[in-house]
Image: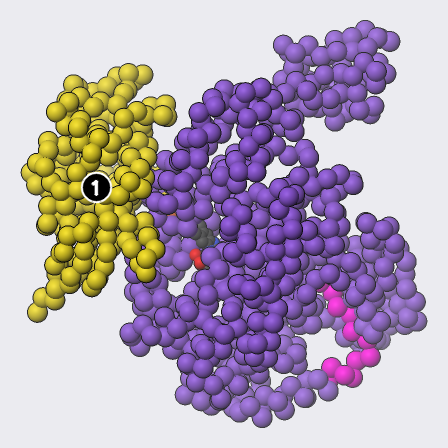
Chain colours: A yellow, B purple
Amino acid sequence: MLQYINLKIDGVNIRAAKGTTVLDAAFEYGICIPNLCHVPNLSNIGACRICIVEQIVNGRSKVTTSCTLLVQEGMIIKSNTDKIRNLRRNIAELLVAQAPNSKAIQDIAVRCGVKKVRYPFRNEKCVLCGRCVRACTELFRAKAIGFVGRGKNRHIDSPFGVLSEFCKRCGACIDLCPMTITPCSGPMKPGKERLCGECESQLYLSDKTPDHCVWCELGKGFQCGRY
Amino acid sequence: MTKINTISDLNALRNKIINEQKKFKITVTLCGGTGCQASGSQAVIDALKNELAKQQLMQTVYVRRTGCHGFCEQGPLMVIEPGNIFYCHISPEDVFEIVSKTILKGEVIEKLLYKDPVSGNLIKTEKEIPFYKAQDRHLLSQNMKVDPCSIEDYIAMGGYAALAKTIFEIPPDRIIKEIKESGLRGRGGGGFPTGRKWAECYEAPGNEKYVICNADEGDPGAYMDRCVLEGNPHLIIEGMMIGAWAVGAREGYVYVRNEYPLAVKNIKIAIQQAMNMGILGEKIFGSSFSFHIEVARGGGAFVCGESTALMASIEGKVGEPRPKDVHTVVDGLWNKPTTLNNVETWANVPSIILNGSSWFASKGSKGSKGTKILALTGHIKNTGLVEVPMGTPIRTVLFDIGGGALNGKTIKAVQTGGPSGGCLPDSKFDLPIDFDALYEAGSMIGSGGMVVMGKETCMVDVAKYFLTFLQDESCGKCVPCRLGIDRMLEIITTITEGRGKPEQIELLQELGDTISQTSLCGLGKTAANPVLSTLRYFREEYDAHINEKRCSAGVCQALITYRIDPEKCTFCGVCKSTCPHNAIIGQKKQVHSIDLQLCQKCGICRSECKFDAIFVN
Ligand SMILES: Cc1cc2nc3c(=O)[nH]c(=O)nc-3n(C[C@H](O)[C@H](O)[C@H](O)COP(=O)(O)O)c2cc1C
Ligand code: SF4
Ligand code: FES
């Protein structure tokens, strides 16, 4: 029998099935927590750290990722405090400085309130969110791709660098990749990378990032589960 | 080998061993730790045994080869009892003299004595050495009494008595209560209360539980865990068994860093010996308690010391941390409740059980009890492993034990806690070595590394050094740690190259704060410490690099120029002939100078000049 658990996210009373993550519980009630590496129905690895929230335990606040946190009875979660918004913005800034050539990443930057980027831009092709790896491993049990290397050398590759015979060419990895959607105005040339922010109608979001869904255009087709 | 089935068996065996050892009139203790082996202790031991055999002294002289004593820089070391005579830097050629003079006649050989670098006096006995005298060597002194490959030595010293007491007299909840009351906190870096960890694991549902000893020790410069595991492996086994009894585990792992072959060898030998005696295995001491230990070799990365990465590594997966929203005491190795403790933490357990929690709690400060082993290195006279009660001021370690800075210079800073610890200036040297006090000061005890820095150290460069290490060692899984450290290093590099901007200081602070609050594992959470602590205490050095393009310590290559002091130059021409870039101009019998366009700042001229005429600007 399904067991239900009561908790509070941003002051809202929430009832969620036991075993649900805080992130999924929040979505269900229309509370928007930005995220990147989370994919519905796949395991959560807590890699991007965009989905951080504050958990209040015995009066003390603890920053943790909502995608890896399971709901517990009486839990108090705050997803949209000044502290969280600042931290989230700083993480999004790191991401967009690393990989500006993706609409998904640019959307996250706008959503998280990045107004300027204080680091020199790079033009990496992968943000190591690991969505592809988990889709391949968990949905298709193919393990045709995985993480290789540590730290700066970490990258995604097929085992031993050769196309695995287990690859069914299903393309799930490509569908889930945040880097395949280019910014609306087309790919940025090397040296011309910038913070896009062109979705002017959406920019007000970055001033007052909403904690409830306003059906914005950001994340359309990617991390937002509503579309 | 005899099996031990009761406490009285153990006591009888201990008395028998002690009586046997009493037959020897003289005991020679030689250090066979990794440090002393590197300086040739094996050859000394072989030579000594040969010489004793030749002179037919094998029945009167007992040669004990022990683990590390912690004074490796003086190795190979020897202590001769009775008399407590201490010899250092021994070579095989000295052995004949030692046997014929000291062992046979009790004469002291002066040239082998230790010379105190502070007073310049020769010191005859081990007890009088200032380096040892100011310490409280509760764990390290045990190393000197046992041959790591001899379970008899360990039993003679009172070993496995705590285990027997536990199994026959103390139920698990009382063990946990005792450990809680002792105030023991984890020595692996986090300082988590050990008793609480055990209690949570004890209460966690499930019959299958594990205990693990963390001997990964990836911090550069730290070797206290190696020293204890290598020198006294039975102590760790006993500690783990008491822990297993308390939490209800039947299996344990010792996770040893791959680079520690001697530690792996010694712990394996110790496990075998304990199995043979019935101390490990099924139905220990004839009770219903069974316990097995396996040795797992480390994955070779710093991050594998992190609890979840370590467990993944034992399971045969990639050694990568995972989120710990459910603690490892509930969901650990193979998803079973697991108690992971550091080597030194386990090593403290048997004596707490034997002597009681109040004995342990009587040492140390309010929030940190017992002793802590520190690895003292850097610009200091005495280097080595130092064991002091918690709460000892940093100053005592630096000056009473360490003997002060090299060459009578001043100490500028100490870096405590390994790569992700912090740097403290001399105004903080009165702080006690205590988990909470150091944490509040922006540093930590960490695993116990203590690097002393002199005037010629540039603090910005230090931050850069540790960031480089952490960048290499980060697993790269989470964004703040992977990209954040990378960007911090990028900024620090621009600062050391003279391209820094004032606003970058604030960015460093903000970024450091973000990394520490949002990273997935402890590596990221502490990675900003080297930057944040140097910013906090040595802000003026950052400012000098940025605003005046000046590195006062003369370290950052882009910001320094080499010059020749015309007063001191004797026109000898050595610099001119050694400069690989032909950057030195000057005729015979004329003051030389350096062509700054050609100079590549290699510093060779400076080290070659006998008259100290070349200086850094
Ligand atoms: C990056 C990283 C490296 C670590 N390395 C070690 C180590 O080498 N040895 C160790 O005992 N603990 C290490 N730790 C701490 C362990 O995660 C864990 O807290 C500790 O082993 C628990 O034992 P304790 O409570 O006895 O300290 C490390 C932690 C981190 C985050
Ligand atoms: S904090 Fe660093 S080491 Fe830890 S999981 Fe994240 S990337 Fe890996
Ligand atoms: S979505 Fe939670 S960490 Fe990436």
x 74%, y 54%: residue: B400
Q: Position of residue A170 (x, y in %)?
A: 11, 40
Magenta stretch? B20-33
Question: Would residue B224 appear left or right of B380 to someone viewing this image?
Answer: left
- Tell me: residue B237, above or below residue A127: below
Q: Position of residue B396 (x, y in %)?
A: 70, 54
x 13%, y 58%: residue: A16
- Tell me: residue B143, above or below residue B6: above
x 44%, y 30%: residue: B506
Q: Looking at the image, which residue sits at the far top?
A: B587
Number of dots carrying numbers = 1
Q: Position of residue B156 (x, y in %)?
A: 66, 81
The answer to whether residue A2 of the structure is visible from this angle is yes
Question: Would residue A65 appear left or right of B159 to someone viewing this image?
Answer: left
Residue at which label 1 appears: A35
Query: Is residue B21 located in the magenta-colored stretch of the structure?
Result: yes
Q: Quadrant of the C terminus of chain B?
A: top right
